[in-house]
Image (tube, rainbow, N blue to C red):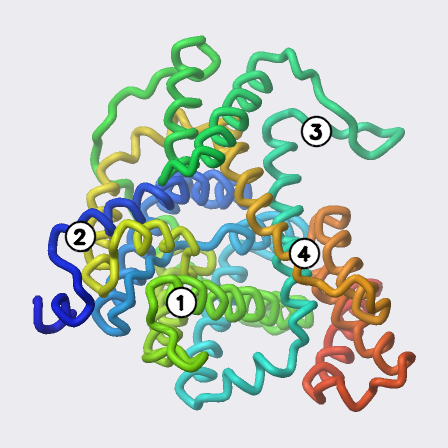
């Protein structure tokens, strides 16, 4: 084990790697409860999604640790799960089984892109500003979902939305969760989001806002309601413009989120040399494989987690960190009864905080260049206002070639962007029919 992972080479030990693996797990354990809560809104069985989430995270993280040998953990991604539930299933009216098939196909395409080493072409084709805008827009979208679930923002006919009743007990509980989680994050406490959810759940049970769970430890929920459902389809209704755009969006967000996370965490660990990431192909292959595996199990896109940086900060330097994290996700399978106390008010803080973190990429956009600012702004603002990540990306990708051509920079636009211009234009025409 020591020789395989290179403990001596990286100046680490079993103890350091184990502590790092635990730190990473605590930092991202919130996904075990947030993901089922979100996908349940799409009509999926909450217990099955909990099991699928834990298994997808465990398998994906294990592959990353053993094959790519990086201290990077994977799990169903925030933003992508919201896109799956609210934009694809509820917004477009696509059945969740078909949406899972879209996730599976996006994973297969990701695998092919990695195997044939054409990822650099795609990375260079899409301008950095649109990548930053997509990340920030998803952040606003997630935060909006959190505010809505908390009851802080509610529907209102005259103005579309308005401020909710802040003195309502469920909303007060959510506000408490947001405040306590913010304090944890400001103080730099590892696993702050997870601990915030724990304290909010306890506060909810103590005050009577949330009914106490019947047990803490229980049997693993059956995977039957979701396992293999990605292929239990009416194939005559599968291949549509809508699904094509869904697949492209899943692929786009997963690809760039993974690439950015891998580089950021690997750079923090000191792996990046001459701006190159060793074993990048294996790491991307682990991520793309996890996406397809997760879709078969019954969850939205599985991707690398930036929370892995907390494990690196705790001393994790090898794939053994990921092996430990994967093992803890398997242990977590037996704590499904706690799903009963993780209500919308409890998950609200996680959604809002993650949204804040993702919105930080707004600062990387060059707002002084109007030809860049327009598509970037529209991408960001359209996601929460149309309640659709795909719509925001589509609008931005349509506007970008237009503003660049108008500016006289047509040659700076990659041919792939012109192709995507027509793809997304066709998407809007199809929706209007």
Question: Does the residue at mark 2 contact the one at mark 4 (Cβ under 8 Å)?
Answer: no
Disc 1 element = helix
For residue 92, say whether it is visible. no
Which residue is label 2 attached to? Answer: 16
Q: Which mark is residue 88?
A: none
* Image location of residue 286, percent across then percent down: 34, 71
Mark with earlier residue (2, 1): 2
How far apart are the two marked residues, 4 and 3, measured between alpha carbons? 26 Å
Mark with earlier residue (4, 3): 3
Seen in the picture, residue 12 relative to 170 is either above or below; the reply is: below
Q: Quadrant of the C terminus?
A: bottom right
Q: Residue at x 25, y 42 (%)?
A: 333
Which residue is label 1 attached to? Answer: 267
Mark with earlier residue (3, 1): 3
Q: Residue at x 51, y 42 (%)?
A: 38
Seen in the picture, residue 389 relative to 180 is either above or below; the reply is: below
Which residue is label 3 attached to? Answer: 153
Mark with earlier residue (2, 4): 2
Which residue is label 4 attached to? Answer: 363
Q: Residues within 10 Å of mark 4 (few under 14, many from 20)?
A: few
Q: Residue at x 57, y 12 (%)?
A: 169
Disc 3 element = strand
């Amino acid at each position: 084990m020591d020789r395989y992972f290179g403990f001596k080479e990286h100046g680490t030990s079993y103890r350091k790697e184990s502590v790092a693996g635990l730190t990473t797990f605590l930092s991202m354990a919130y996904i075990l409860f947030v993901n089922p809560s979100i996908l349940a809104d799409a009509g999926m069985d909450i217990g099955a999604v909990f099991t699928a989430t834990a298994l997808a995270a465990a398998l994906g993280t294990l592959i990353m640790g053993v094959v790519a040998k990086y201290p990077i953990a994977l799990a169903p991604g925030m933003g992508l799960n919201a896109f799956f539930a609210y934009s694809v299933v509820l917004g477009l009216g696509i059945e969740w089984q078909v949406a899972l098939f879209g996730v599976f196909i996006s994973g297969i395409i990701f695998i092919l892109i990695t195997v044939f080493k054409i990822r650099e072409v795609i990375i260079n084709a899409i301008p950095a500003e649109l990548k930053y805008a997509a990340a920030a827009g998803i952040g606003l979208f997630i935060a909006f979902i959190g505010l809505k679930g908390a009851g802080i923002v509610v529907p209102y006919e005259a103005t579309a939305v308005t401020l909710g009743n802040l003195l309502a007990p469920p909303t007060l509980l959510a506000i408490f969760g947001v405040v306590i989680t913010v304090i944890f994050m400001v103080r730099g406490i590892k696993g702050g989001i997870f601990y915030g959810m724990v304290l909010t759940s306890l506060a909810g049970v103590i005050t009577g806002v949330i009914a106490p769970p019947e047990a803490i430890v229980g049997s693993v929920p059956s995977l039957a309601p979701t396992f293999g459902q990605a292929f239990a389809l009416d194939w005559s209704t599968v291949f549509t413009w809508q699904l094509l755009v869904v697949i492209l969006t899943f692929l786009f967000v997963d690809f760039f989120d993974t690439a950015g996370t891998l580089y950021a965490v690997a750079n923090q660990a000191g792996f990046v040399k001459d701006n190159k990431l060793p074993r990048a192909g294996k790491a991307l292959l682990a991520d793309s494989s996890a996406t397809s595996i997760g879709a078969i199990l019954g969850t939205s896109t599985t991707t690398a987690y930036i929370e892995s940086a907390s494990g690196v900060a705790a001393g994790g330097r090898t794939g053994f960190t990921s092996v430990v994290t994967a093992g803890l996700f398997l242990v977590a399978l037996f704590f499904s009864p706690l799903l009963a106390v993780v209500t919308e008010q409890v998950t609200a803080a996680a959604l809002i905080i993650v949204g804040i973190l993702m919105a930080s990429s707004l600062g990387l956009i060059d707002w002084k260049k109007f030809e860049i600012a327009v598509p970037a702004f529209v991408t960001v603002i359209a996601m929460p206002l149309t309640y659709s990540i795909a719509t925001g990306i589509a609008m931005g990708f349509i506007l970008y070639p237009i503003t660049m051509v108008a500016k006289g920079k047509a040659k700076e636009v990659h041919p792939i962007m012109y192709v995507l211009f027509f793809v997304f234009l066709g998407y809007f025409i199809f929706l209007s029919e």
